[in-house]
């Protein structure tokens, strides 16, 4: 029941983030609903395909699809009567990241997979929906932006903490709540303080042309 409720809440929050992203792009109502549903269900769908879970979660339990549709409609109504905060999309995305990362980890955990696979699947479930949303919105995904505050790293830390707490004897529900709070806290702190991972750049060879990478012709005759 706990996993079910966490999944439903995660679907609703991610659907709201998809609807807000569609609104930022000036999409029509159909576009809003489609983007909201794809954002909410995309990560879990890809996770289920990778884990060979058929049918995928929202086909097996249509309440998830209804939750996405209802959240999209409620977001439409809310925005119509009230201007959303500037960072509403980031807040919704952060909450969805926390909820979906742990629910995805629990799905992988229930299949008896190793700890590292649980971390990967939990993280993937948390970030994939946002990546799909940004791609369909013609935006560089948050996950890949060089100036983006901690995102996938927060999910990795939270899922790792979830497994570590259970290993230490903490019950599953408490471990889930603490891990979700940790993911959300890391994400929001990173946004406020602009904390991110160092960027990696390969230095160009000395004398190479910036455009072609070929050695620059010497002007010293």
Image: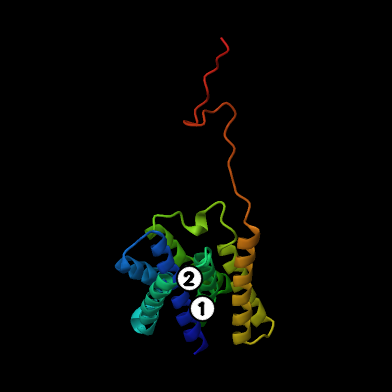
Q: Earlier in the sequence, mark 2 or mark 1?
A: 1
Which residue: 63% across, 73% down?
Answer: 182
Q: Is residue 50 visible?
A: no
Q: Name the residue nearer the viewer: 135 or 58.
A: 135
Is residue 28 in sight in this rendering?
yes
Quadrant where the C terminus lies? top right
Q: Which residue is mark 2?
A: 125
The percent position of residue 89, horizontal first and vertical second, equals 49, 66
Colour pattern: rainbow
Q: Locate residue 68, reporting x and y percent.
A: 39, 77
Percent position of residue 82, x then y: 46, 71
> In the rendered view, would you say 123 is above or below 209?
below
Tell me the SS state at disc 2.
Answer: helix
> Which residue is depicted at the point 60% across and 49% down?
199
Label 1 near label 2: C-beta < 8 Å?
Answer: yes
Q: CA distance from mark 2 to mark 1?
A: 8 Å
Q: Please give the name of the residue rendered at 64% of the width and 82% of the height, measured from the top-left corner.
A: 166
Q: Is residue 195 above or below residue 50?
A: above
Disc 1 element? helix
- In this image, 48 relative to 215: left or right? left
Residue that protrudes farthest toward the front in the picture: 81
Judge the density around disc 1: few (<14), some (14-19), many (≥20) Cα neighbours within 10 Å: many
In this picture, is 179 found above or below 35?
below
Q: What is the quadrant of residue 55 in the picture? A: bottom left
- Count residues near mark 2 (Cα–Cα under 10 Å), then give few for <14, some for 14-19, many for 20+: many
Q: Which mark is residue 103?
A: 1
Residue visible at 59% across and 86% down?
173
Name the quadrant containing residue 152: bottom right
Residue 62 lies left or right of residue 191; in this view the side is: left
């Amino acid at each position: 029941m706990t996993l079910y409720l966490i999944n439903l809440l995660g679907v609703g929050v991610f659907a709201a983030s998809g609807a807000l992203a569609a609104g930022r792009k000036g999409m029509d109502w159909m576009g809003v609903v489609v983007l909201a549903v794809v954002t909410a269900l995309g990560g879990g769908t890809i996770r289920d395909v990778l884990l060979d879970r058929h049918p995928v979660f929202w086909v097996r339990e249509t309440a998830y699809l209804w939750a996405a549709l209802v959240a999209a409609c409620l977001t439409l109504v809310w925005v119509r009567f009230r201007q959303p905060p500037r960072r509403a999309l980031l807040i919704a995305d952060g909450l969805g990241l926390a909820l979906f990362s742990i629910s995805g980890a629990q799905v992988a955990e229930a299949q008896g997979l190793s700890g590292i696979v649980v971390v990967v699947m939990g993280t993937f479930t948390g970030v994939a929906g946002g990546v799909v949303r940004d791609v369909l919105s013609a935006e560089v995904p948050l996950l890949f932006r060089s100036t983006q505050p901690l995102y996938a790293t927060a999910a990795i830390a939270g899922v790792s903490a979830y497994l570590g707490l259970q290993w230490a004897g903490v019950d599953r529900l408490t471990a889930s709540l603490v891990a979700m709070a940790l993911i959300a806290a890391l994400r929001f702190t990173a946004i406020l303080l602009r904390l991110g991972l160092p960027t990696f750049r390969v230095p160009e060879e000395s004398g190479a042309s910036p455009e072609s990478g070929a050695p620059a012709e010497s002007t010293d005759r």
